[in-house]
Image (cartoon, rainbow, N blue to C red):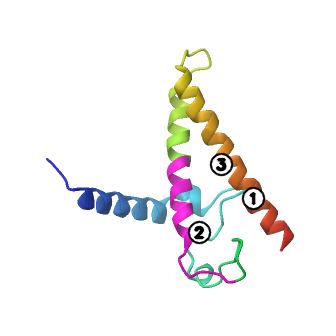
């Protein structure tokens, strides 16, 4: 079965919406960095301006970023579970994981700073 790019994107978007609505990890958790009321309507209209500008956009970048972070979370957990401590991995795999960790850490530190300085 061959799918067009648009059809594949639509299927992926539907699956992400379904996973995010029903996911217990995102709705009830003890981990820092995940909002308790993930999909509650009250949070949608009261977003914060964490950007550089003085006016908040209405693009809902937070929602989009949360979807991407959920994807990173699930793939990272799966990858973590697949690996053994004594596995030998190609350098390119180690490099990609290291760069991803560095980029996530940079984003985390920026958002953490913005939230603490408000």
Which numbered disc, 2 or 1, marks the residue that appears first in the sequence? 2
Image quarter of residue 33: bottom right
For the point 55% across and 40% down, which residue is it?
76
Residue 58 - label: none
Tell how many labels: 3
* On screen, residue 77 above or below 2: above
Q: Residue furthest right?
A: 117
Left or right? Give the position of 104 relative to 117.
left
From the image, tell me which residue sits under label 2: 62
Which secondary structure lies at badge 3? helix
Which secondary structure lies at badge 1? helix
- Location of residue 30 in the rendering, given as x and y in whole percent from the top left corner: 70, 55
Left or right? Give the position of 108 relative to 3.
right
Do callouts 1 and 3 mark residues in contact (Cβ within 8 Å)?
A: no
Q: Residue furthest front?
A: 53
* On screen, residue 93 above or below 102: above
The boundaries of the magenta stretch are 55-72
- Location of residue 1 in the rendering, given as x and y in whole percent from the top left corner: 13, 47
From the image, tell me which residue sits under label 3: 104
Residue 110 - label: 1
For the point 86% across and 69% down, which residue is it?
117
- Location of residue 103 in the rendering, given as x and y in whole percent from the top left corner: 65, 46
Q: CA distance from mark 3 to mark 2?
A: 15 Å
Using the image as rendered, state which of residue 38 and residue 57 is in the foreground. Answer: 57
For label 3, the crowd category at 10 Å Cα-Cα, with few meaning under 14, some 14 to 19 and many 20 or more, is few
Q: CA distance from mark 1 to mark 3?
A: 10 Å
Which numbered disc, 3 or 2, marks the residue that appears first in the sequence? 2
Q: CA distance from mark 2 to mark 1?
A: 14 Å
Using the image as rendered, state which of residue 92 and residue 74 is in the foreground. Answer: 92
């Amino acid at each position: 079965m061959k799918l067009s790019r648009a059809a594949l994107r639509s299927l992926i978007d539907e699956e992400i919406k379904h996973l995010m609505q029903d996911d217990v990890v995102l709705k009830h958790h003890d981990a820092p960095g995940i909002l308790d009321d993930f999909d509650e309507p009250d949070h949608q209209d009261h977003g914060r301006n964490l950007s550089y500008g003085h006016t908040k956009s209405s693009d809902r970048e937070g929602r989009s970023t949360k979807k991407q972070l959920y994807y990173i979370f699930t793939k990272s957990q799966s990858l973590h579970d697949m690996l053994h401590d004594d596995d030998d991995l190609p350098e390119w795999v180690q490099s990609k994981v290291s760069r991803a960790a560095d980029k996530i850490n940079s984003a985390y530190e920026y958002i953490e700073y913005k939230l603490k300085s408000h």
